[in-house]
Amino acid sequence: MAIDDPHTTLRAQICRTVFDSPAQSAVELRRAAARGAGLPDDLQPLVDKIHHHAYRVTDDDVARVRATYGDDALFEIIVSAALGASRKRLQAGLEALDKA
């Protein structure tokens, strides 16, 4: 039995907007942040932390990459990472409910 999810269309629209819209950061970079893999070495630790322990992200973590990416691009990367992490958790939850 598949779980009926009434928000699938809205989530897809949000993902298209965040990942594919023109922005300060490259589409490929935002998509990599959402996957949590394939990022430049300087961004990987921050994105890993967002994916696995978001509550532990500090101002220092962000400051380490701010000079390289700038505020706008970094915001987009962080939002992409958070959205990607949330999608993984949602999918795992829906799969668990489906198996129950």
Image: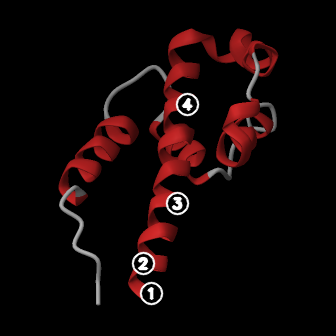
Q: Earlier in the sequence, mark 4 or mark 1?
A: 4
Whether the residues at callouts 4 and 3 have beta carbons within 8 Å, the answer is: no
Residue 77 image label: 4
Q: Earlier in the sequence, mark 1 or mark 3?
A: 3
Question: Could you say which quadrant of the image residue 5 lies in?
Answer: bottom left
Give the residue at x 58% y 47%.
32
Above or below 1: residue 92:
above
Identify the colour scheme used.
secondary structure
State the separation of the CA atoms marked 4 and 3: 17 Å
Q: What amino acid type should be assigned to the residue bearing mark 4?
A: Ile
The x, y position of residue 66, in whole percent, is 70, 13
Q: Earlier in the sequence, mark 2 or mark 3?
A: 3
Q: Nearer the viewer, mark 4 or mark 1?
A: 1
Circle 1 residue: 100
Q: Nearer the viewer, mark 1 or mark 3?
A: 1
State the separation of the CA atoms marked 4 and 1: 35 Å
Give the residue at x 53% y 59%.
89
State the separation of the CA atoms marked 2 and 1: 5 Å
Give the residue at x 24% y 59%.
8
Q: What amino acid type should be assigned to the residue bearing mark 3?
A: Lys
The front one of 90 and 60 is 90
Circle 2 residue: 97
Whether the residues at callouts 2 and 1 have beta carbons within 8 Å, the answer is: yes
Q: What amino acid type should be assigned to the residue bearing mark 1?
A: Ala
State the separation of the CA atoms marked 2 and 4: 30 Å
The x, y position of residue 44, in whole percent, is 76, 40
Give the residue at x 29% y 41%.
14
